[in-house]
Image (cartoon, rainbow, N blue to C red):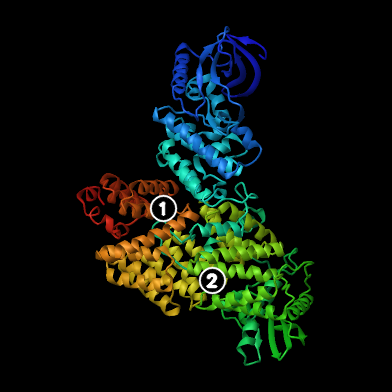
Amino acid sequence: MLDQTISHYRITQKLGAGGMGVVYKALDLTLERTVALKFLPTEFALSETEKESLLREARAASALDHPNIGVIHGMEESEDRQLFIVMAYYEGETLSQKVSRGVVSVRDSLDYAIQIAKGLSAAHARSIVHRDVKPSNIIITTDNIAKIVDFGLARVVATTSATQSVSNTGTLPYMAPEQILGEPVDQRADVWALGVLIVQMLTGSHPFLRPNTAAMTFAILNQPPSAVDALPAPVQPIVYRALSKQASHRYANGSEMVQDLEAARAQITAAPLSADEPTVTRTLSPKQIRRYVENASTPRWRTQSARSKRILGASVAMALLAGVALSFPRVRANLFQPSYAEAEKHIAVLPFVSQDDDPDTELISSGLMDSVTNRLSNLDAARRSLWVVPASAVRARHVKDPNSAYRTLGATIVVEGDLQRKDQHLTLTLNLVDAKHLRQMGSEQVQNHTGDLAALEDDALFKLARLLNAKMPETDTQRAGSANRSSYESYVKALGYLQRYDRPGNLDQAVSMLEFTTQRDPGFALGFATLGEAFRLKFQMDNHIPYLSDAAKNAQRAVELNEQLSAPHATLGKINITLGKTDLALQEFQKSIALAPRDPDALIGLGATYEYQNRLTEAEAGYKQAIALRPDYWDGYTALGNFYFRQNRLQDAIKEYNKVIELTPDNAEAYSNVGAAYMTLNDDKSNALAEASFRKSIQLGPTYVPFTNLAMLYLTERRYSEAAQNARKALEYSDKDWESWNTLLIAYSWMKDEQNIRSTRAKTLNLLEQYVAVNPKQSTVQSRLSTLYAEDNHREKAVSFANTAIALSPNDSTVLGDIAATYEVLGNRNKALHFARQSLKNGGTLADLQRRPTLRSLVVSPDFRSNGM
């Protein structure tokens, strides 16, 4: 058609083609202006009624007169009765062309998204729905203005049988679920499509991209969007809400979305990106963590169930580990099989003893046992003929002799060690014992006259490898690597403290020694890796933001020094989970498992990532595989118990927590966890067991966790004064956790202590805002914020957070209970009743609703009771 004249338009250039037609650049010979002509496909056999409908749509769109909507001059028909739409011509490119070159910068992406949302808002205000928002229908002009084109075309074209399949094929990646299902479509379908565009612009990937149409259709209808974790934190809740499967959970129209997008842009542009960081980064760096921290963020991923949010404590970290090993066929094939075969050497390193009456030597012996155990795991890694029992499992079962190692741990070979130190002279005697037949297989003595523990350990490992007939790895990734004698001694002592990080003071001692180690030897990769994990554990225990930044900084430094270390990748994976960035966590755990395929910590992390993505069967399998690899280490059972708790499988959770107590009778965390499970059962007998468990936890190691849990129990039992007392006690141990403040606020509210309610609510609100800034996917944080904003008379914020929470977790009973409280405070009793009933239908309890002071009148109202509640 080039150079042809149709009506009074001379065709000069073909601009593009798609399922909806072909677009040409043309010169309007009458008005002497450049225009764009869109010809409908020749196979479209439109009736006169359909043509009139299309014309009405075109006229309605042309009347919008909005800077972000492409101008439609009219619709005409060629001499051969082919319809075409006359549109304004804009110099520039389509968004599709722009995205095809790579990700769009954060600023430009948000600017385009806001402009598109404003254009949609103008159309939606006149009840006009686009129905086909996609990159090729967005023109970015040379002035960087986004123009939406083809308004109204999709609906009319889709009415003909000839075009239905064409329309579906061309627009499926941007169709909302209700479009695919053939249900009525309104403005919220456009909101969905814009959510997809935002992900594409910022990440370069489609959130539901699959290899074929059937798979993509299934993903849109049933699976969560991918790549959202790579978006800036303020944008994530906007996209999750826009991509809610249920239209009722999305923004009602473009106008609502504009407000949140502008707020996100303001938050992001308040901290300018550096010149070398123009787009979304897909790898976590300490710089990024610091930026989150400087924005007053307080990330923490709590152990949660569908009914309650009551497990607080150190076990959270192990549940936060996430990973991908289950995607490997090798792991799938042996998922529930014994973790070692008879032909393998199943080795346990027993606690090294010290002949010296010296606490320092005893601590060195403890750490040396750990270091030797870790490095033994690397021997013969390619053939995997060794299975090494973790040092922690040996300690947990108090195994001190070969016979116990065989009976309790299934170890066929035992390594015994005896360390002696006299001034600078070190002597380590190693005995290799056949644990099954109680026969000595060999003995070696290693000496060092300069006090060099690293050299002593290297010699010991070499001789052990020779005794075991195992091949030393060409590169021992776990090798000490420290050239500084005193720094390595501190490192070994720190390992001893980290073995029981749950004991008060141990983490501080470990961090102090590791900081000394890395300062004295800045090239010691393993020291930085261990320091990163120690800081992560401190954050987990204390919820103090700078610890998270320090953890990432040190782990990243370890990777820079030695990219073959698996430990820092696991630490970075845990940090990413804490931030709600499951895609990045997945990458880090993939790297960790690739370097250490049998690392149970990484497998626990794998389980948590799958759980976060709601892939529950795979998550449970990951946790169980981790236990199979280390059947006598308490953290694995804790992680599985936490998983069961979050899935409301309370009896299963109690069973796993009791296994932890069997393994480690002095484990304060385990008693707090089992108490939380008993409390959630919420009957007189279980509540009594819960109280006893919390008190036992406090007796073993008082932290804010069991005090907060005990306060929650007292709230359930309406012992408000005691609840407030224990919540205040929790805050004495840590005042940085929002849950403790929230518990205190609820207690004060029931006590009608107006003097303390306002200040406590302000503190709780502040901590929640910090939290959600970094991890916006925590639906329970969003729902609690909605209630607090309602109580502070911020209606718009309250409703916005309520909608986001529901979009994230539409079936979470705690979220639904919070939203009921929100609408009760806002004076909308009908909605409050609706969400209260939904909470009960989704596993919530009447006691759970009764615990909320704002629902005190609702739960006794005739309307509530009339529905059998």
Asked if one can make out residue 196 in the rendered structure from this viewpoint, the answer is no
Mark 2, other Cα within 10 Å: few <14 / some 14–19 / many ≥20: many
Asked which secondary structure carries label 1, the reply is helix
Q: Relative to 28, is 564 above or below?
A: below
Name the residue carrying label 1. 782
Residue, disc 2: 634
Frontmost of labels 1 and 2 is 1
| Three-letter amino acid code at the position of disc 1 | Gln
Residue 306: quarter of image: bottom left
Rendered position, 608 above or below 530: above
630 to the left or right of 726: right
Q: What percent of the width, then of the height, locates residue 433? A: 71, 81
Q: Gap between marks 1 and 2, in whole Å? A: 33 Å
Q: Are marks 1 and 2 in contact (CB under 8 Å)?
A: no
Front residue (pair 445, 48): 48
Q: Position of residue 365 (x, y in %)?
A: 65, 83
Where in the figure is residue 257, as x and y percent of width and height? 44, 40
Q: Amino acid at mark 2?
A: Trp
Residue 776 rendering spot, x and y as whole percentages: 47, 52
* Image quarter of the N terminus: top right
Q: Secondary structure at mark 2?
A: helix
Of callouts 1 and 2, the N-terminal one: 2
Left/right of residue 649 with respect to residue 722 in the rendered view: right
* Left or right: residue 296 compared with residue 689: right
Q: Residues within 10 Å of mark 1 (few under 14, many from 20)?
A: many
Where 229 falls versus 403 (above or below)? above
- Compare residues 25 and 539 and report the one nearer the observer: 25
